[in-house]
Amino acid sequence: MKMGDRQTRRMMERMGIDMKEIPDVEEVIIRTASKEIHVHNATVSEVNAQGNRIFQVAGEVEESQVEKETFNEEDILLVQQQASVTRERAVAALQESDGEVARAILKLTS
């Protein structure tokens, strides 16, 4: 037995379920510790069921791995202080020197 849209909507209302589409969504990004999932041209529906909000996402999916930096905050501060540079330059130097603090400092001071 098939139900029409009207019957389905009435049944959902009786069960306390409200569903609506979120307009003008361009992209949805899901970030985890190891990867990012980008959903382009996304269609997003929000279902509110008894106080719980559930999002349904559909679209073109693209995944990419997240690179973990091999240096910590102390390394950045040390390079900044020793080379007298901004945080951005210290981070760039550490990236170029594969996280080796001494090489980063030498690169910035010579």
Image (cartoon, rainbow, N blue to C red):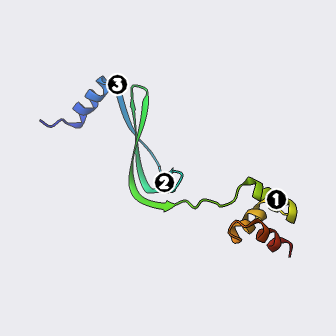
The percent coordinates of residue 40 (x first, y second) are: 45, 57
Q: Marks 1 and 3, Cα distance to the nearest angstrom?
A: 57 Å
Q: Marks 3 and 2, Cα distance to the nearest angstrom?
A: 29 Å
Q: Residues within 10 Å of mark 3 (few under 14, many from 20)?
A: few
The type of residue carrying mark 2 is Glu
Q: Is residue 85 above or below residue 13?
A: below
Sequence-first tag of 3 and 2: 3
Q: Residues within 10 Å of mark 1 (few under 14, many from 20)?
A: some
Residue displayed at 75% across by 68% down: 93
Is label 1 in a helix, a strand or a loop?
A: helix
Decide which of 84, 29 is in the foreground and name it. 84
The percent coordinates of residue 48 (x first, y second) are: 40, 31
Q: Looking at the rendered structure, which numbered label has been put on residue 27?
A: 2
Residue marked by disc 1: 78
Is label 2 in a helix, a strand or a loop?
A: strand
Does 32 sit left or right of 78 as displayed? left
The type of residue carrying mark 1 is Leu
**Answer yes or no: do the residues labelled 3 and 2 have beta carbons within 8 Å?**
no
Q: Residues within 10 Å of mark 2 (few under 14, many from 20)?
A: some
Residue marked by disc 3: 16
The percent coordinates of residue 108 (x first, y second) are: 82, 71
State which quadrant residue 15 falls in: top left
**Answer yes or no: do the residues labelled 1 and 2 have beta carbons within 8 Å?**
no
Which residue is farthest bottom?
110
Q: Marks 1 and 2, Cα distance to the nearest angstrom?
A: 38 Å
Decide which of 63, 19 is in the foreground and name it. 63
Camera-side mark, 1 or 2: 1
Camera-side mark, 1 or 3: 1
Sequence-first tag of 1 and 2: 2
The type of residue carrying mark 3 is Gly
